Image (cartoon, rainbow, N blue to C red):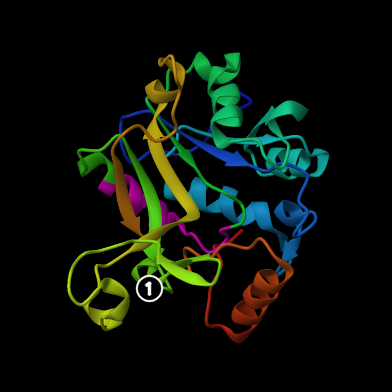
Amino acid sequence: MSPLLTLQGTPLETESVIALIPARGGSKRLPGKNTKLLAGHPLIAYTIAAAQQSKVFQQIVVSTDSDEATQIALSMGAGVIQRPAKYASDDSPDIEWVRHALMSQSIADEGHECFAILRPTSPFRTAATIQRAWAEYERSPCDSLRAVEVVKVNPHKMFYLNNCELIPILPTYDVPPWHSRPTQTLPWVVQQNASLEFSKCSLVRDRLFPSITGPRIWGFLNPEPEGFDLNTVEEFEKAERMVASGEWRLPSV
């Protein structure tokens, strides 16, 4: 195993799993978010620490174009893959940097079977969260697993606006229609959050049209605070308040 990318500790399972942590330098809504200090530590440090403490991964790698993120990752014993600028723009899809990382020689040589995406903007995700998600993924019949939470506004009550006419986003011919029913009687709907994902490396490496999910995705219910995502000034301030009040706890670093 490559000395630069080796993680000390015994993994929970024999299957080889790599943690990929994306930390590009550019961010418009919250500049420098991945290395911004929260409760005395850079945001990315909590994700690296949780990954290390989970003992799920054989390697932990940060994909970044940021010198600051690079130094933090190396100081904590994580590996670093330098991300090319063409994969680090605002509109770069995940598949680009994930494939770049997995196809990098220092990672490809390890022959990992699965990978996780752990984003620094979810600092309240703990080692226990990762362990639960990995256990669910191993038991699932799906290609990948993705963290989700219940939506705050049910889409059955949403409309398109077409010249002032309301067109239901989810039309139904039932009586009464979805939008006129009590919310508690509507189908349960979840949305993805940024906390974590697990998937098979072969979906990225071995397919003509690479995918980070595959056709079947397992839902891992992971609400606040573990699924809380920090991408704006307001969300960062909320995180600071919740930590200061003791209501939410961060992983130890």
Residue 18 visible here: yes
> Where residue 183 sits in the image (x, y, percent)?
30, 80
Type of secondary structure dominating the magenta stretch: helix
Q: Quadrant of the C terminus?
A: bottom right
* Residue at x-position 54% and y-position 20%: 107
Q: Is residue 126 magenta?
A: yes
Report the residue marked by disc 1: 157
Q: Residues within 10 Å of mark 1 (few under 14, many from 20)?
A: some
Q: Quadrant of residue 198?
A: top left
On screen, residue 59 versus residue 89, left or right, reads left
Question: Could you say which quadrant of the image residue 141 lies in?
Answer: top left
For numbered disc 1, what is the local secondary structure? helix
Q: Nearer the viewer, residue 236 or 172?
A: 172
Magenta residues span 122-136
| Amino acid at the residue labelled 1 | Lys
The verdict on residue 239 being magenta is no
